[in-house]
Image (tube, helix red, strand yellow):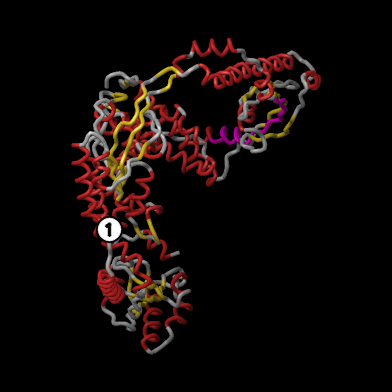
Amino acid sequence: MLLQNMRDKAQGWVAKVIVAAIAFTFAIFGLESLRPSTTKQDVAFVDGEAITQQQLLEAMDQQRRMLVQQMGSNFDAAALNDPMLKTAAMESLVQRTLLRIRLKKNNMVVSDDMVDELILSVPEFQVDGQYDPERVRQYVRSAGMNIAQFRNMLREDMVATQLRAGVAATEFVTSHELRHLNSLQGQTRDLSWLILDGKKVRDAVTVSDEDVAAYYNEQSASFMQPEQVSVDYIVLDKSKLAATIEVTDSDVSTLYDARVVELKSKAKAELRASMILLEPDDQRDQAATMALAKQLSDELKAGADFAALAGKHSDDTDSSAKGGSLGIVETGFFGDAFDSALAALQPGEISAPVEADFGVVVIRRDAAGEARIPTREQMSASLKRELREQAVEPLFFEKSRQLADISFEASDLTQPAETLGLEIQQTDLFSRDGGKGIAANPRVVAAAFSEEVLDMRTNSDLIDFDANQFVVLHRREHKKPEQKALESVKDEIAQILRTERGDKQLLSQAEALVSELVKGAEKQKVADDNGLAWDQKEKAQRFGVEISALLRAKAFRLPHPAEGKSSFGTAVLENGDVAVIQVTNVVPGSSALLDEAQMRILGANLALRNGSQIFDEYVRNLRETAKIEVVRQGDEG
């Protein structure tokens, strides 16, 4: 639609003012980044640049949150404690640090305005098409970051995207490569396969107590109980503090009257308009278009029905369906010529033809809309909430200052809790990887394992838990790393051994079957002798969905069989079963070039894939030439 295209290209002063306001807002919120870190431990160094324990904890926390969001109600809580989470977080931090160092050397930067423009454009940060700062704050809190961290992450990602695009853009694709790729993609294969039941084999494996003990002794480092701590804590909650503030009817009435004045003033200041848009085309040049617009303007001034003429003549289907109405018009949205003509009109007045950037328009200025004013009762709850929010800010600041002072002087949480009327709560034991409840917050974890709280047993500094809460901790219990008892991990080890031995048996059995088939054994006899059954698929496609992805991938990697022969191989499937695969026939796809549009799409996709691989190689080269040191837990940072 024309209007939608115009909206997409809108570059009025209103957008610039919003960008400036956002920049100011983020500059204020960014003060959170000036707070000192509560942990001094470094966990890695990349070319001399440190990665701190807190950064690692925050990265792990963000990955946990993303897992929960992606998996929804189906998420497996046990997966959140997987050591792979820590490895993935560390790898991400190392790569980001490598890229940041390289970008700095290359003098590649992104301005604050570019970051603000990106945030403005994100649909998830908008309500009814308008930017909503609260949406940003909600997202940032849910990701376990503050505004400054979020902006820095966006800035790094934007510059890294430029680098990725620059490296990837060096790749190109020839017509020969396109023909070859088209042939490979269209290739089909005739397949047969046997399935060896992995669970059945693993369950049949016998594991003795001696086997378990031997594994436990050999892999003792894998069965360590990590260092753990539990804490007492108190929470100063702004929302609970606000609930204690009394709001009088007089206060509500005063604020309501002010809101009524604002709503009436806003409605009066709104510019409303209708238009008839005429666009020159092959059948009607600019002169003819202006002549028609002049005719319509004269008819309207003489009393013709605007909606009828708009429905008959306007080239903008959105507004013509509404009798030409544009509703409220923002200054700058339709361009200077449109704005000047509209500003010169009185309500109900019709303009002469106006040459706008998007065509010729005849404009009618419509009467200002009536202010929609809710009753005092309808607004009462929101007004009380607003008054409490206004009143709670200085009170929350004063209480937080008081909490910080008392907690610093007190030997435990008893005095600050009693003075401020707060409840002392406790966590379960948790490790440096975090735990449940407030222990999932990386700032809490960092403070709990800090020297002051863990060793000196003092109260922690105020922890900015989120925008509306401050937390103070005190050590409750501390457990140093210790070896887990054999009895507590016996079942886990037995399952590990059953899986390892069962998988080994499965692969050995599958390879033995392949060996028989390669030597010329009759395929049905091989299946019958082992209590198995052949499945088959003729003309299986490389990207078909009717066969297991892992089975299909292995089948299409097997060599082309000779005339009258077969190719054989094995594949471990998604559920742990093992397949014995036979390929009897390969039919290549067409190597003819596609039409121009298809070639362009295929070429772009191939170049993008190859370009991504080139960038991955570029990052790997950065790793190989960089000095990367990962500090073992317990080492000095």
Across and down, in percent, residue 143 comes to 38, 43
In the image, 501 versus 253, the foreground residue is: 253
* 394 lies left or right of 271: left
Across and down, in percent, residue 59 comes to 36, 34
Check disc 1 and report its element: helix, strand or loop: helix
Q: Quarter of the image holding residue 371?
A: bottom left
Q: Is residue 444 visible?
A: yes
187 drawn magenta: yes
In the image, 59 versus 571, the foreground residue is: 59
Q: Which span of residues is magenta-colored? A: 178-195
Q: Is residue 341 visible?
A: no
Q: What residue sits 26% from the left and 58% below the top?
A: 16
Q: Compared with residue 500, is residue 619 higher up or lower down, i.e. above or below?
A: below
In the image, 16 versus 233, the foreground residue is: 233
Across and down, in percent, residue 101 comes to 28, 30
Q: Residue furthest bottom?
A: 302
Q: Quarter of the image holding residue 180?
A: top right
- Quarter of the image with the C terminus is top left
410 drawn magenta: no
- Quarter of the image with the N terminus is bottom left
Across and down, in percent, residue 611 comes to 43, 34
Q: What residue sits 36% from the left and 50% below the top?
A: 138
* 67 lies left or right of 191: left
Q: Compared with residue 314, is residue 134 higher up or lower down, i.e. above or below?
A: above
Q: What residue sits 29% from the left and 53% below the top?
A: 241
> What is the total number of numbered labels drawn onto the structure image?
1
Q: What residue sits 34% from the left and 83% below the top?
A: 348
* 107 lies left or right of 158: left
In the image, 211 versus 330, the foreground residue is: 211
Q: Which residue is mark 1?
A: 18
Q: Compared with residue 94, is residue 278 higher up or lower down, i.e. above or below?
A: below
Query: In the rendered structure, which amino acid carries the disc numbered 1?
Result: Ile
